[in-house]
Amino acid sequence: MYLTNFLNLYLFKSKTYKTSTHIYGVFVRLKGKGVLIIGKSGIGKSEIALDLIQKGHSLISDDSVIFYKNNKSNIIGEAPSILRNLIEVRGLGILDIKKLFGRKSVSLRNELSLVIELKPYQNEMAYSRLEMNIGSFNLFDIAIPKIELPVNHTRHVSLLIETAVKNYTLLSRGSSAIEDLSKKINLQLSLDH
């Protein structure tokens, strides 16, 4: 967040695409998919990105992401040139990910495939336990799939994000664990009668 505040003037004056916008968040490449992680300041986006990078995924941009329309249905995200390869982590400062983890730890740009919104876990909320709810995040009049993920200090968030992306990919291909379970239950019920 401090990095973004410090660079706001630069970003305002920088040359960008005609139809571009800056979004506060972390953009990573995960299994070939561009995943934007958003949430309130201090929720842990950069730390989660650092964990994902350590697991072999790559950073595209931290704190501020430039998104632009590539064509009528594709949105591409990249880092402002001054922020490329950099990540700000509380307590560690500004880190050069490419120097720390190697060139495979960073990507220049990627198509935006999915948005993960981190929200503080609340005990009184009724969270879905049977299936992943997929909403939408609108950008340039294009609906991007969005998953809200409740987080707290006991949850392994980078693992949950990796699993959400894999599960979203399966759902996109028509494979649903809840539908498979429902078919098995119905089959078992029909055999029992």
Image: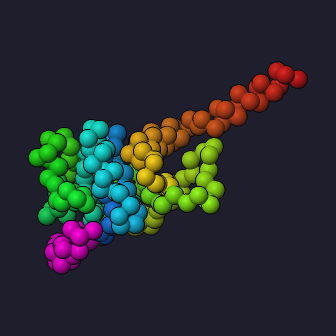
Q: Is residue 33 visible?
A: yes
36 left or right of 13?
right
Tell me residue 137's x, y (percent).
46, 62
> In which quadrant of the rendered view does residue 13 lie?
bottom left
Which quarter of the image is occupied by the N terminus? Answer: bottom left
Which quarter of the image is occupied by the C terminus? Answer: top right
Tell me residue 128's x, y (percent).
62, 50
Residue with the most extreme left position: 99
Location of residue 24 with respect to 111 vertically, above or below: below
Location of residue 98 with respect to 9 vertically, above or below: above
138 left or right of 192?
left
* Dominant secondary structure, magenta: helix
Tell me residue 93's x, y (percent).
18, 60
Q: Residue at x 16, y 55 (%)?
A: 95
Residue bounds of the magenta highlight = 1-20
> Is 9 within the magenta?
yes
Residue 164 vs residue 89, the one in the foreground: 89
Tell me residue 86's x, y (percent).
17, 56
> In which quadrant of the rendered view does residue 71 lie?
bottom left
141 left or right of 183?
left
Location of residue 166 with respect to 70 vertically, above or below: above
> In which quadrant of the rendered view does residue 39 lie?
bottom left
Residue 54 vs residue 174, the one in the foreground: 54
Q: Residue at x 33, y 62 (%)?
A: 25
Residue 11 vs residue 154, the one in the foreground: 154
Q: Residue at x 54, y 53 (%)?
A: 134
* Image colouring: rainbow
